[in-house]
Image (tube, rainbow, N blue to C red):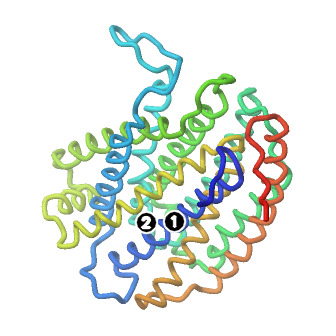
Amino acid sequence: MWKTTEGSTGRLLQLCLGYFFFYVIFGVATKCFTGKAAIVVPIMNDMEFLVWSTLGGSLICLIVVFAARWYRTKTDRFIQAGPLTIPAEYAYIIPSGICTAIVIPTTTLMYMLLKSVMVAMVIMRASVIVICRVVDEAQIRQGILRKTVYREENIAVVFAIAAACTQIFLAKSEDFDFLSNAAAMAVLSTYIVAYMFRIYIMNYYKNTRPKGAPLDNKWFFAIEQIAASVTMALVALLLFFCGLQLKPIVLFHAAVAQPHAQWFPASLAGAVYGTVAFFSVFIFMFKGRTATFAGLVNRLTSLVAGTTATLVSFYIFGGRFPSKADWCSLALILVAVGFLTVAEKKRAAELVAAKEIEAQPEKTG
């Protein structure tokens, strides 16, 4: 058994391995359900897959949250809201859940609105990396974050953005049609703003814990996911009954009113993605690390998992082989990982010296 302590490098690696494993499974499933692999499966359109995979992902999160009782209050700070006494952190964790409810559908809407899925992925991954660095800078200036962003982390940001943007050099001019597409620009702007608030809130919670106060990421995750699920359910009901004839709403109504034959397998695939969410959030909120570092670890893991999913899809299901751009991107990722490794060694030593985390026990023969 690989035993690790909270905030240790070993615990971080465990989270990355879990994220990688489930992301690869979901990546392969997505290719199969949406017709990007040769396996014979009745193809779903993007909206159908979004609806049923989102349902599966939300349900698995809620099942774990309620079964494990992660929702139980883990704070000693309360405020009075009328007749109710509620945790003070609800004031920003619930908005974080609403932001999560915005991020999930806007991700797929980006794929639907842009001609190039690759360009959509590049924009979203690169934007999250930049957002994390901006959040650190903002919280340092506000006095919320009292750690410095190491030079190696800044260098890794450059290589990570280069890795994310590599394939853009091969994109055709029409792949950038979103620049003149008002709907696509609106969705992209909404995605970026929602993700920025969410990452800021995650790090605000992490960086403002009073000394000795509990830092329970499971509790944060539970309240955020409950808020996200309630928000998505309310919006889904509104869209289903609103009667508007906009294309995305028409597709959504059809996906719900006339379920695809593969709705249940797609929901199971979504449950895998819901499992990814656990690892993703816990990496974003990893103890003692900057948003820059955690965001890089999160996005780089997804980039490597994406390439791996393409390989698995090719060898098992007859999908496409990774392109030269994929391999160039992977090379740049490895360089970024090298700089992050140096930064992690420095950070771990700093945290041990400050007694914020326990020193890793030495291995004995």
At a point 29% along the width and 67% down the height, the residue shown is 266
State the mark number for residue 111: 2
Residue 233: % across, % down: 27, 43
The type of residue carrying mark 2 is Tyr
Q: Quadrant of the N terminus?
A: bottom right
At a point 18% along the width and 45% down the height, the residue shown is 242
Contact between marks 2 and 1 (CB within 8 A): the answer is yes
Residue 316: % across, % down: 43, 89
The type of residue carrying mark 1 is Ala
Residue 45: % across, % down: 29, 71
Direction left: furthest residue = 258
Q: Which residue is mark 1?
A: 120
Mark 2 or mark 1: whose residue is earlier in sequence: 2
At a point 83% along the width and 56% down the height, the residue shown is 152
62 left or right, relative to 214: left
At a point 60% along the width and 53% down the height, the residue shown is 128
Q: Nearer the viewer, residue 41 or 35?
A: 41
Q: Quadrant of the C terminus?
A: bottom right
Q: Nearer the viewer, residue 156 or 342?
A: 342
